[in-house]
Amino acid sequence: MSRSLSRPTRGKTQPGRFRLLDPLLVGRLAGIAAPDVVDVGIGSSPRTTLELHVALGRRGRTTGLDLDPARVQALCDLDEPGLHGFVGGFDADLPPVDLVRAANLLRQYKLDAVPDALLAMGRWLRPGGLLVEGTTDRHGDRGVFRVFQRTADGLVPDALVFVSDPARSGFAPRALTPYLPRGMGWHGHPGAEVDTLFTAWKQAFERARDAGARTPAELFAGSAAGLAEIGLATTDPAGHAEGRVVVPAPPGARRGLEVARPE
Ligand SMILES: C[S@@+](CC[C@H](N)C(=O)[O-])C[C@H]1O[C@@H](n2cnc3c(N)ncnc32)[C@H](O)[C@@H]1O
């Protein structure tokens, strides 16, 4: 993998930005006594990398990777057991890990660089390991992540995860479209599979409202339950209440690495 794939990017980050996502990652790694994880792109403050390590119970090894040595140094200065810094990009030579989290990074890359970047990060995974890539708004009140799993067949789509903090940002399904992963049904491009999902979500939203849901949180959880009823999302009332909807990839899915360009 050529080093030239990596690009210096802006470094903005905010404490708590992954408060809606990280519990899902903790759940997915629950069976691993001491998980090895990599957070790609530390940003201007090492707080969100530390928060992932703390969410995982400080029980494994969390590595913050960044192209910028000063950002890596700030992480190392925390002097937190189990938390490590590594200067490098997509070509970094890392020991195999259980999880790669890459947030608010690829949005700043050219669309045609995205598949190679995903494949490069996927190479760090142990068999069964997860690559979680996505975008949020500044405070993590809204976001979308795609999850891939490394299998014997390579890196395969596992799920799309939508996060929303309705009490802080209100809620309407299509308000999440600006955070869709790079190259995926850009802005709900009509005809894309993701557009079908948002149409179903809007219908579920209307059914929840007709059934008496009023607050943004009730509308989020009610519409998520409606999506689950028709088999498009997992049934997970606790996750819905925490602001997460998980849309599993169809069995045998191969989609997600290719670049869908808007017409
Ligand atoms: C916008 S910040 C995101 C920080 C944090 N992940 C968040 O979402 O709040 C992006 C960071 O990724 C780093 N970065 C960009 N490309 C990278 C690459 N290929 N490998 C490692 N770090 C990279 C930048 O230096 C920057 O610190």
Image: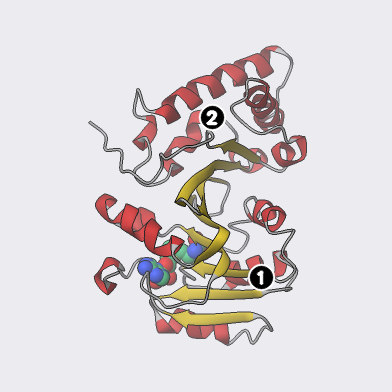
Give 175 or 203, whichever is nearer the viewer: 203
Q: From the viewer's perspective, tell me whether residue 138 is left or right of residue 181.
A: right
- Residue type indicated by callout 1: His
Q: Position of residue 94 (x, y in %)?
A: 48, 77
Q: From the viewer's perspective, tell me whether residue 62 is left or right of residue 121.
A: right
Picture quarter with ligand 1: bottom left
Q: Which numbered disc flags the more N-terminal residue, 2 or 1? A: 1
**For the point 61% across and 39% down, which residue is it?**
246
Would you say the residues marked 2 and 1 are in contact, meaning their CB atoms lie under 8 Å apart? no
For the residues labelled 2 and 1, the Cα–Cα distance comes to 31 Å
| Residue corresponding to mark 1 | 53
Q: Which of marks 2 and 1 is in front?
A: 1
Quadrant including the N terminus: bottom left
| Residue corresponding to mark 2 | 173
Helix or strand or loop: what does disc 1 sit on?
A: helix
Q: Residue 27 carries which label?
A: none
